């Protein structure tokens, strides 16, 4: 498939009178080695759902939380009241062409870090720059950089890069991916009651074991589902489209897990 430019229209508000915003993305020639160069249906569905998720993301509704702020690096705190909405940290894992992260920056009016493997990041950075005016006009910003889930970052890197919200859409393509993804989430997600993880996963028969394994490991590490649902979308492939059923879920730390973290820190 040759390189193409595609436009995706995304709502940034639940107010139907607010026009949808056009996000224009370049999709380079697709190969089996670079599936991240395509905007898959699950990403578009999550991008369109973001405005509806705000009530489930308390960290976006509050001007600050001292409890949440104590887990962040000093540069992400405000002098007066813990977190400030402008300093909230949002991370997208496996960002691909960048649709979800760009939509989140415009919808949530925050800075979003878009990450993927090094060979995906060149096009990811191109798309972020291409939509910079749109993002800025909605009070957001984005950065892009490589993040390989198989890497083992230093404790200093992890400590200085903690996020209040982590997002991922259609990231599971290998039996190794569920554990790698969960390890990355637990490494970078702030250990606080307001922290959230938002995922959207296509329920393809071939990858159902990966989806089930992901959910199992997330529960095992101390995260729990607070809201979920299913929806129907479409993957376009070649000259046709294929209907896909997707599951979306919002995860938070269990209180018992956080209490255990507090007990350990007090020793």
Image (spheres, rainbow, N blue to C red):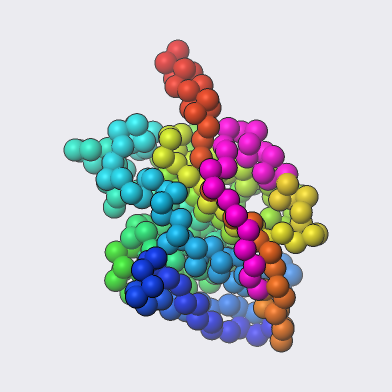
* Residue shown at 51% from the left, 21% from the top: 260
Q: Quadrant of the N terminus?
A: bottom right
* Residue shown at 53% from the left, 43% from the top: 226
The furthest residue to the top: 267
Residue 163 seen in the figure: no
Q: Quadrant of residue 42?
A: bottom right
- The image position of residue 69, as x and y in percent, is 33, 36
- The image position of residue 181, as x and y in percent, is 62, 47
Identify which residue, 252 or 119, lies in the foreground: 252
- The image position of residue 264, as x and y in percent, is 48, 18
Q: Where 118 sits versus 223, above or below?
A: below
* Residue shown at 48% from the left, 23% from the top: 259
* Residue shown at 37% from the left, 45% from the top: 59
Q: Is residue 216 one of those drawn in magenta? A: yes
Q: Quadrant of the C terminus?
A: top left
Span shown in magenta: 213-234
Q: Is residue 246 left or right of residue 71?
A: right
- The image position of residue 45, as x and y in percent, is 56, 66
Identify which residue, 14 or 100, lies in the foreground: 14
Residue 42 seen in the figure: yes
Q: Where 49 sits versus 223, above or below?
A: below
Q: Is residue 225 left or right of residue 21?
A: right
The furthest residue to the front: 16
């Amino acid at each position: 498939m040759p390189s193409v430019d595609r436009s995706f229209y995304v709502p940034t508000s639940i107010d139907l009178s607010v026009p949808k915003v056009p996000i224009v993305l370049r999709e380079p020639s697709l190969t089996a080695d670079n599936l991240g160069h395509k905007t898959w249906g699950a990403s578009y569905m999550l991008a369109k759902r973001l405005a509806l998720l705000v009530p489930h993301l308390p960290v976006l509704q509050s001007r600050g939380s001292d409890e949440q702020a104590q887990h962040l690096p000093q540069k992400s705190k405000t002098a007066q009241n813990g977190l400030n909405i402008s300093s909230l940290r949002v991370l997208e894992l496996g960002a691909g062409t960048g649709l979800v992260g760009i939509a989140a920056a415009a919808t949530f009016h925050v800075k979003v870090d878009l990450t993927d493997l090094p060979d995906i990041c060149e096009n990811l950075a191109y798309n972020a720059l291409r939509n910079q005016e749109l993002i800025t006009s909605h009070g957001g910003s984005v950065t892009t950089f490589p993040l390989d889930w198989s890497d083992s970052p230093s404790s200093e890197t992890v400590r200085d890069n903690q996020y209040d919200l982590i997002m991922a859409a259609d990231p599971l393509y290998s039996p190794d991916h569920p554990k790698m993804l969960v390890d990355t989430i637990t490494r970078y997600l702030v250990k606080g009651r307001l922290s959230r993880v938002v995922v959207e996963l296509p329920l393809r028969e071939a990858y159902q074991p990966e989806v089930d394994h992901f959910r199992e490991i997330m529960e095992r590490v101390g995260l729990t589902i607070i809201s979920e649902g299913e929806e129907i979308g479409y993957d376009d492939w070649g000259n046709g489209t294929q209907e896909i059923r997707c599951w979306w879920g919002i995860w938070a730390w269990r209180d018992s897990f956080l209490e255990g973290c507090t007990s350990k820190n007090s020793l």
